[in-house]
Each structure stands twice: as C-alpha cells, then as structure tokens.
Amino acid sequence: MKLDLKKSMPAYHARRASFALVTVPPMQYLMIDGHGDPNASPAFAEAVAAIYPVAYTLKFASRNDLGRDYVVMPLEALWSAPDMAVFTDARDKSRWDWTLMNMVPDWLNSEDFQAAVDAVAAKNCPAALDRLRLAVLDEGLCAQTLHVGPFDTEAAVLAELHDEFIPGHGLRMTGSHHEIYFSDFRRVPSSKLRTLLRQPVVDASGGRFVGISPSRTTVGPDERSAP
C-alpha cells in the first residue's frame, strides 16, 4: 500500500480563512539554499530541477528495496529576510533568502540519500545537485493557514498572521516563514494555487530555540490542505 504522509500528518492540514496552532515534529528534508526573486533567479529553477530527481529516486528505492512505497511529498520552502515587511508591506522579492525543500520519510537515512544523489548524478547531473543536502528541521509550535490564490495575494494574510493572530495569542515569531505548495505552480492557474502558510512561534515571554540541524533525527467538508 502506498502511504500518503500529507494525509496522515496533522502538520499538513490547514483551513482557508482560519488560523490554527499546531505542533510540528522534527522532520528531515532535501534542502537547497538560495537568494532572490524566485521568478527571476536561475538558482531557484536549478534547485527545483535538483530536488525532484533525488526525491523520486529515494521513493523508488524505498519501494523496491525496503517494500515501503509512499507518495512523494509536495515542494516546500523556507523564506526569510532581515525585515519581515518585505513579505507583507514592501513585498520586495529581491531581498528574500530561501531554502527549497522536500520532506523525506524517517525510515530513509543519509546513506540512502547519498546513493540517490550518486544515481541521479550518473544519469543526467542537475546543475545544483552538489548543493543538495539532507537535514532535519525542528519547528515545534507553529501558526498556520491555507491560502488559495496567487502568491502575491498572500501579503494581506501574512500581515494578519504576523501582526494580529500571533501577538494576540501571546506569541512571537521565530525561525523562518514556511510555505508548502500543494499545487504545482508550473501547471495550475494562479487563482487555484493552494499553499499552506506556516510561521514558527514561541511564547512572547521566552521559549525554546528552533532551527535546522545538519544531522539526521529519527522521529517516530471545509477546504483542507490535504485532500
């Protein structure tokens, strides 16, 4: 049976026009870092072209060698900037730092990752393959919602999330803005794009640090994010 993790994990569920708090467990991802406007930066397209071949090679290796088949997870990205207003008021994409990601099930490890990278390199090596890594992201408590529509209409939703919902619940932002793309933005009309918007948070009076670890960790009728 093919496992669809986005259906079984609460972290991949969200509702449109509704903010919620959810605790996200540590998960491992394929990751590539970059900077600048994703619509204009060749590095962004190169990152996409490197992630998917490795993601599918890992999926087929898991199915064929381990007998554990799964649906390749959606593309995700972390976004950050010194001034968070570039995501809301200013919307200055040239100042964005990003990490493109794809979640990998916890039963696969660094050896499986390296074998997949080697297999992809032997066939048709993507330009950004040498920048791809496997790392763990531990976000902990997060505020999130589902946005439907063009990416450029996210600003008002993010402003409400950042300036009203989060401080209104006695929280403050930490970590990076996180987006999960349930729609293929290369093929789906912008008006129908479905994007989970997530922001890690901590208690405004103090809280634990969350971030990226380079080592692997094993971790055990509304409109929703996962169909």
Image: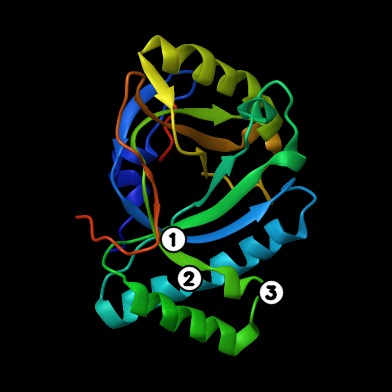
What is the distance, in whole Å, between disc 1 and disc 3 at their CAs? 22 Å
First in residue order: circle 1 vs circle 3? 1
Q: Residue at x 44, y 55 (%)?
A: 73
Secondary structure beneath dot 1 equals: loop
Mark nearer the viewer, 1 or 3: 3
Marks 1 and 2: in contact by CB < 8 Å?
yes
- Image quadrant holding the C terminus, namely top left
**2 or 3: tag closer to the N-terminus:** 2
Q: Which residue is mark 1?
A: 72
Mark 2 or mark 1: name the one nearer the start of the chain: 2
Query: Which residue is label 2 attached to?
Result: 56
Percent position of residue 9, x then y: 30, 44
Q: Is residue 191 above or below residue 106?
A: above
- x then y, percent, for residue 152: 70, 30
* Picture residue at 64% right of the left edge, 46% below the top: 97
Q: With 205 as the anchor, is 76 left or right in this view? A: right
- Quadrant of image for the N terminus: bottom left
Furthest residue in direction right, as rendered: 40
Indicate whether 152 appears above or below 4: above
Q: How many marks?
A: 3
Q: Which dot, 2 or 3, sits closer to the camera?
A: 3
Q: Amino acid at mark 3?
A: Ala
